[in-house]
Amino acid sequence: MMSREQFEQLMNKLDTLIKVTAASSLQGKTMTDSIGFLADLGFGNSEIAGILGTTPAYVNKVKYETKKSKKKGEKKRKKKRPKMVEAETQSEQEKVENHDEQGPV
């Protein structure tokens, strides 16, 4: 059976391994992208903070702001879509009117 000291050493080594693996996976990513990536893998705020060297409160803030901005982006896309359809319809209408004005060729 493993002693408490051996268990703690093993846990420390596993923590180090997780951080090294995460660091290599997160190379070139922003802090926001890294937080999202680790959250998608199922890590909690405290675990993400430990891996990235920040606080759980900061991780929570970034996750909240990301979720909030995604919702705004979805609303904007939904609002823009009818305008684009309207613009396409208007453009098609102008083509028809221009063709009618020119008469038969």
Image (cartoon, helix red, strand yellow):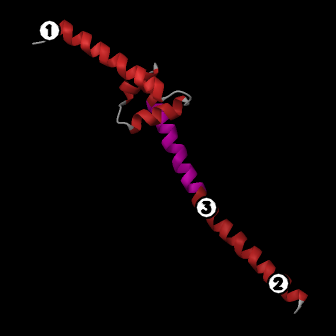
Residue at 48% in and 43% down: 67
- Of circles 1 and 3, which is in front? 1
Q: Quarter holding the N terminus?
A: top left
| Residue 74, above or below 3 | below
Residue topped by disc 2: 97
Amino acid type of disc 1? Ser
Ranked by sequence position, the earlier of labels 1 and 3 is: 1
Please say whether residue 66 is one of the residues in the magenta stretch.
Answer: yes
Q: CA distance from mark 2 to mark 1?
A: 87 Å
Residue 50 in sight from this viewpoint? no
Which quadrant of the rendered structure holds the C terminus? bottom right
Q: Is residue 71 left or right of residue 14?
A: right
Q: Is residue 65 visible?
A: yes
The answer to which quarter of the image holds residue 45 is top left
Q: What type is the residue that disc 3 sits on?
A: Lys
Residue sitting nearer the eye, 102 or 44 = 102
Q: Residue tagged by mark 1?
A: 3
The image quadrant of residue 81 is bottom right
Number of the label disc, if any, that sits on residue 79:
3
Q: Residue at x 80, y 79 (%)?
A: 95
Residue ranking furthest to the top: 5
Q: Amino acid at mark 2?
A: Glu
Residue at 66% x, 70% y is 85
Mark 2 or 1: the one toward you: 1
